[in-house]
């Protein structure tokens, strides 16, 4: 992939993450962190609302199936990162849920409870 295409993909990804964060805020979620690194991976967005921690993996592709990038290995890395985040976070929560936000331009599709934390 050329440098120009990599920059364009990076910009599209950042714009998509902002779109997802804005959507979460608009529905009452508080964004706790973005692009948190730990546990051997990165959490795109961690949000909280009414005792629920929502860990959001943002997938934006201009071509191809974005969901194909969420492999079992990726889920294991995200789970490790989530455990690392939660072990450091001092806030209270009753539930943790993973969500995948699929972004196609301005279209946003949510897959809630995308996989189990355990």
Image (cartoon, rainbow, N blue to C red):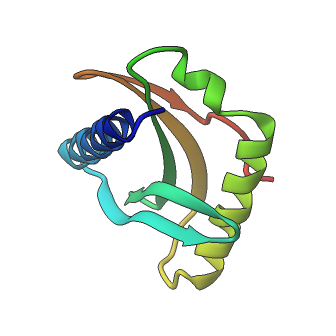
Q: Position of residue 78 (x, y in %)?
A: 66, 54
- Looking at the image, residue 50 lies above or below residue 27: below
Q: Is residue 41 or residue 88 the one in the foreground? A: 41
**20 versus 35 height, above or below:** above
The residue depicted at 54 percent of the width and 70 percent of the height is 37
Residue occupying the point 28% across, 48% down: 21
Q: Position of residue 43 (x, y in %)?
A: 53, 58
Q: Nearer the viewer, residue 107 or 94?
A: 107
Residue closest to the eye, 69 or 91? 69
Question: Residue 60's image quarter?
Answer: top left
Looking at the image, residue 25 lies above or below residue 110: below
At a point 47% along the width and 79% down the height, the residue shown is: 91
Q: Residue at x 18, y 43 (%)?
A: 26
Which x, y percent locates residue 103?
Answer: 37, 26
Nearest the eye: 7 or 79: 7
**Residue 77: x and y, percent?**
73, 55
Count of numbered circles on the image? 0
Residue most toward the front? 2
The extreme top residue here reads: 64
């Amino acid at each position: 992939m050329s440098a120009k295409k990599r920059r364009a993909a990076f910009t599209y990804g950042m714009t998509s993450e902002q779109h997802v964060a804005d959507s979460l805020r608009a529905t009452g979620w508080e964004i706790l962190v973005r692009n948190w690194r730990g546990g051997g991976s990165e959490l795109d967005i961690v949000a909280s609302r009414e005792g629920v921690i929502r860990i959001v993996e943002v997938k934006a592709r201009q071509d191809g199936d974005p969901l194909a990038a969420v492999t079992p290995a990726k889920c294991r890395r995200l789970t490790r990162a989530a455990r690392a985040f939660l072990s450091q976070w001092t806030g209270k929560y009753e539930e943790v849920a993973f969500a995948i936000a699929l972004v196609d331009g301005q279209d946003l599709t949510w897959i809630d409870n995308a996989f189990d934390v355990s």
